[in-house]
Amino acid sequence: MAEDTANAMATGADIIADDSESSRNATLERCLNVLRDARNDSEQFAALLLITKVAKAGEIDSKTRRRIFDAVGFTFPNRLLISKDPPEGVPGHTFQALGLTLLACFCTNPDLAEHPQVLNKIPTFNSVIAACDSGNASCGSMINDVYQCLGAILATPKGPRELVNRGALVALCQAYVNHSYGYDQALQLLVGLLTSAEAKCWLRAPSALMGVLDALSAEFQKAEDVTKFQLCEALRHFVPPLLLPGSECLQSLYQGLSSILSSKLSASQRDPALKLAACLTQAYGSGWIPTGRSGSKFFALLANLACVEVRMSLEYLDLAAIDEKQELVATCYVLMEHAILECTREEESLLQEEQKVQLVGILEEAFGAVVYYLSQAGWEKLTDPFVFASIRILGAWLAEETSSLKQEICDLLPFLLHYAKLQFEMGKKVRSSLQNPESGDGQEPAWQGDALRFLLPGLSHLTAEDQPRAILISEGAPLLLCNYFSHQWELFISDSEIPFASDAVESTLQTACAIFLNFVVAVPELISREDCFAVLMEELLKSLPSLRPQGEHLSLVAGMTALGLMMARKQTAHPGLQKTPEAEGFFSAAITFLAKAHVAQPDTVSESVVLQLSPAYEAAWPNIGELWLLGMQAFASCVPLFRWLPEIVLHSVWLQDLLGFLGCVSPTSVDLELVTAFQGVLVELATSSHPCREVIQQHRGAELANLYGMAALEQCLSHQ
């Protein structure tokens, strides 16, 4: 083959003697003719070699590349790649190098880049990266071809998965850590892989990726030139999903970012640093920043820079400029959200109280810009993801602060409610289309997410105030919230086997209950006026009993119990409350929640029996204590309204148990608030039901009333 190859190459030398640009296309055509008419491997090899001399892969148009592939196929490149001994006079690696060049040429066609014959070469590409000597010129060319092939594979839909599964991820990591030839190309490919398949990459090769992160962070800390800012861009993609605070790479990243952000910089230098800081903050909160004065000062600076950037970007409302800076502003939103958390954290906060006060003022100015942007541009850009991001961060602010920007927020409420409704309806369509693929028409814009979930905590505060509550009612908030509650309940019972999803939905349901309670307490006539509350009552009647045996949902039970009882007082004519099985089930569940809150326990110190919180209620009591008291008051109000309710109470033995532990515990262990709550229920039962009155009297009711200072109960029992 050596002699044939040499002769064929000599014959072709005349073909490429004229290397002028004007003759290059004609020369390439003659080479293709030689390739097409080749009688054996030697002639084919020579023709291919000549083609590579005439034009590099990137200089050949797609039509010509296809003609080369049609003439050669994969068989010949495959043979070249496995050929170990080149003919005499032919440099080593020549066959393998030509095979790689051909594949690099073919891979510029996306259809060929995802061909199985290319994908099964990934292990070969990995070995070339690992074995080639960077000082060898031919090896350098081979590695360049390999990286071109890997880049083409990465750009295909299945490429990232194939590269991870076939070991390319690890090979690229090693190439960068070892600073092998083309390691900068390896880094670009790693960034692309992490962008496309981050979770899969960290699951498959965490130690290899950590090696790259360690190398990058060390370089980042030491760099004193433009490299430092370039590394910011790359490092954003290497933030692992889990990293222990105090890790050496985090310290290096903190030192590097502190050096950048404490200097006077241009926007092009500052922006990559802000983006990296936001990635770290989103992944680890403030855990990557050391505690103490230096860390506190750094975080305050970071939050300040983010707020200033948001104001500069949004206050002057140049929409074209805002569109160009959306990624950066969204990055600043991440930092602002964590600044809110640090300002509201009472223990182990990075910030001193003085810093918190200053930062709250700066945040208020930044959120003024967010509100202004939404009020001016929101209606026109309803499908823009940046609008969703702006509403989400505003929701985080409103969850903690509603006293500032009060009028601006009130003016914005109609838009926020409209947007939330739009996203809610779109979300239901998306979920429906996923469940029934054939029902979708493919015409709906992409769903941005559940905007209402992020607004609910703020709405909980706003509905407690007259002006914003009136606006929300006039804009149809009750109907939207009732529909949303029903939908979230469906998600809750369907996602009960997914803990994190279930927890998020449960928190949403609890907040919705708080909002409804604000409506019930402040505008009680609304409950009988708005038809949606009748539907909500039906939902509560069916839902609460299903939660009764599940102690882990105690906060939700508390909210639904208090809400249902408060609404029942205003919906006495509701068909579902006319001693139906649903009504009996609801009130029985409410009684269980109210009755199980306290127990009589021996006190080792005083050697007496005292009233204590039930162990199952202790952890949740700071959140549910007021709901329990409200539930007791509402239940007492329901007793005379539903004449069959005392019968449910007697059947549950709640009345007997309540009188029993009041009779055995030390009166000093029952505070006045509890005495008032118990008396309210006892008085109504004694007044409305003769059997209940007899039970109370049989359990020393008059004596207990005198012992606990229950004057109303004592007076009630004295009247025959």
Image (spheres, rainbow, N blue to C red):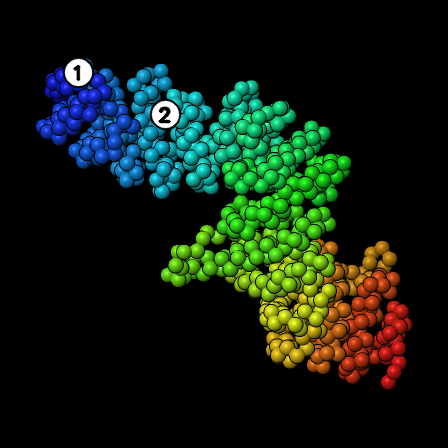
Using residue 53 as the reference point, say whether residue 559 is left or right of it.
right
| Residue 502 image position (x, y, % from top left) | 56, 56
Q: Amino acid at mark 2?
A: Ala
| Residue 94 image position (x, y, % from top left) | 24, 21
Q: Amino acid at mark 1?
A: Ala
In the displayed orientation, state which residue is furthest to the bottom.
720
Which badge, 1 or 2, comes first in the chain's sequence?
1
In the image, residue 457 sits, relative to residue 657, either above or below, namely above
Q: Nearer the viewer, residue 83 or 389?
A: 389
Q: Residue at x 81, y 64 (%)?
A: 674
Question: Quadrant of the rendered structure where residue 623 is?
Answer: bottom right
Q: Nearer the viewer, residue 425 or 10?
A: 425
SS at circle 2: helix
Mark 1 or 2, closer to the camera: 1
Q: Label 2, on which residue?
A: 130
Q: Residue at x 52, y 21 (%)?
A: 226
- The numbered dot on residue 17 is 1
Question: Quadrant of the rendered structure where residue 558 is?
Answer: bottom right
Using residue 202 as the reference point, say whether residue 267 is left or right of it.
right
Q: Residue at x 72, y 78 (%)?
A: 641
Q: Residues within 10 Å of mark 2 (few under 14, many from 20)?
A: some
In the image, residue 165 sits, relative to residue 495, either above or below, namely above
Q: Residue at x 57, y 23 (%)?
A: 221
| Residue 246 visible from this viewpoint | yes
- The numbered dot on residue 380 is none
Quarter of the image where the N terminus is located: top left
In the image, residue 440 sits, relative to residue 572, either above or below, namely above
